[in-house]
Image (cartoon, rainbow, N blue to C red):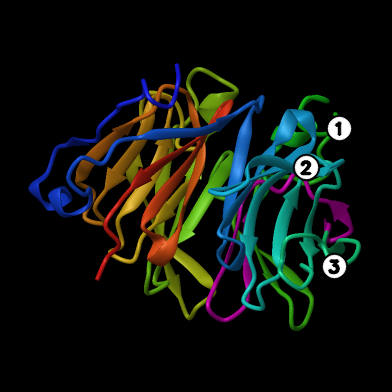
């Protein structure tokens, strides 16, 4: 299917979603060639998107002028990425079972030096395989640690888990302290804060490994900026799994699934469905003022124009 043939348009289930999509907005395929894409992050001053092709152990780059290129090989099977408050790039490394940091060169197109190890152990035991990461406004790093990178050699290196559970972690970079934020979820995966950071959403994708597992997003209240409380099921996602997701400035959740992106209001209402012809791994906003939703789905990168919140 060529880009010109792909004319998927969003489905709207709630009138509130009408403001989200400009007239005539369609899903456009920008690039292909990955095996399993994940972890997109927008680099504003390069007008470029970086994302992982995990089984091929590399990171890819796309921008409007130059198209698709390989940004890094030997990426240690990185999964999720995000920008820290200082603009450096944080990675969830399956291969090293750690959170890594890349300082970007002037112009931010290439790494400035070797990656820095941020955190790799909890209470003397190696992490499982950090999966996705977000940075809170106070500078703390929150990340999930399911076992997917140590189950085989496809997305990491096969190994026995050393942790007693699959945790959501909080890391304080000022004092170098790693603590468990939650051990409630069976296999925590994607995560994102609400705009006011009073709610943390985390997906549980244990259905990836067993038929009776979970495929849902859990919402937690964030008390005192660091304690997770009052867990509740926000949404059960189907078909497929709620792998990665994002929350926009409205507080609306854009959640991956097997047939596209599901859009939810924070009141739990399903607002819209963005159909994508491949299983979606993750997504992010980018472009000027976040006017595009970039969707990484299996082998390809897709883009849809959206109206940013005012």
Q: Which residue is mark 3?
A: 112
In the depicted view, which residue is nearer to us: 296 or 229?
A: 296
Residues in magenta, as a range: 120-143
In the depicted view, which residue is nearer to us: 194 or 88?
A: 88
Between disc 2 and disc 1, whose residue precedes?
Answer: 2
Residue at 17%, 45% in the rendered image: 23
Q: Which residue is mark 2?
A: 94
Q: Is there any visible trace of residue 246 in the rendered image?
A: yes
Q: Which residue is mark 1?
A: 157
Outermost residue toward the left in this view: 15
Asked if residue 163 is positioned above or below residue 135 in the image, the reply reads above
Q: Is residue 154 left or right of residue 12?
A: right
Question: Residue 260, how many percent across, how many down?
Answer: 38, 31
Between disc 2 and disc 3, whose residue precedes?
Answer: 2
Residue at 91%, 62% in the rendered image: 114
Q: Is residue 252 left or right of residue 121?
A: left
Q: Are marks 2 and 1 in contact (CB under 8 Å)?
A: yes
């Amino acid at each position: 299917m060529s880009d010109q043939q792909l004319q998927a348009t969003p489905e709207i289930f709630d009138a509130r979603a009408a403001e989200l999509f400009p007239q005539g907005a369609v899903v456009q395929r920008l690039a292909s060639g990955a095996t399993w894409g994940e972890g997109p992050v927008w680099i504003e001053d390069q007008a470029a998107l970086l994302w992982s092709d995990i089984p091929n152990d590399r990171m890819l780059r796309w921008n409007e002028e130059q198209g698709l290129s390989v940004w890094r090989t030997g990426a240690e099977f990185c999964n999720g990425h995000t920008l820290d408050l200082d603009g450096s790039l944080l990675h969830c490394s399956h291969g090293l079972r750690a959170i890594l940091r890349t300082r970007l060169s002037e112009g931010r197109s290439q790494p400035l030096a070797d990656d820095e190890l941020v955190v790799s152990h909890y209470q003397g035991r190696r992490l499982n395989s950090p999966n996705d990461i977000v940075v809170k406004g106070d500078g703390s790093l929150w990340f999930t640690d399911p076992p997917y990178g140590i189950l085989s050699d496809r997305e990491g290196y096969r190994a026995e888990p050393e942790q007693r559970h699959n945790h959501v972690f909080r890391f304080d970079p000022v004092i170098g302290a790693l603590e468990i934020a939650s051990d409630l979820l069976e296999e925590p995966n994607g995560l994102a804060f609400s705009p006011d950071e009073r709610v943390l959403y985390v997906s549980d994708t244990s259905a990836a490994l067993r038929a009776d597992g979970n495929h849902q997003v859990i919402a937690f209240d964030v008390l005192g900026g660091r304690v997770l409380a009052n867990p509740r099921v926000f949404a059960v996602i189907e078909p497929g799994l709620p792998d990665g997701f994002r929350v926009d400035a409205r507080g609306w959740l854009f959640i991956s699934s097997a047939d596209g992106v599901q859009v939810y209001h924070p009141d739990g209402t399903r607002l819209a469905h963005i159909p994508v012809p491949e299983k979606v791994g993750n997504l992010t906003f980018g472009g000027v003022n976040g006017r595009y939703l970039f969707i990484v789905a299996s082998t390809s990168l897709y883009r849809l124009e959206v109206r940013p919140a005012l």
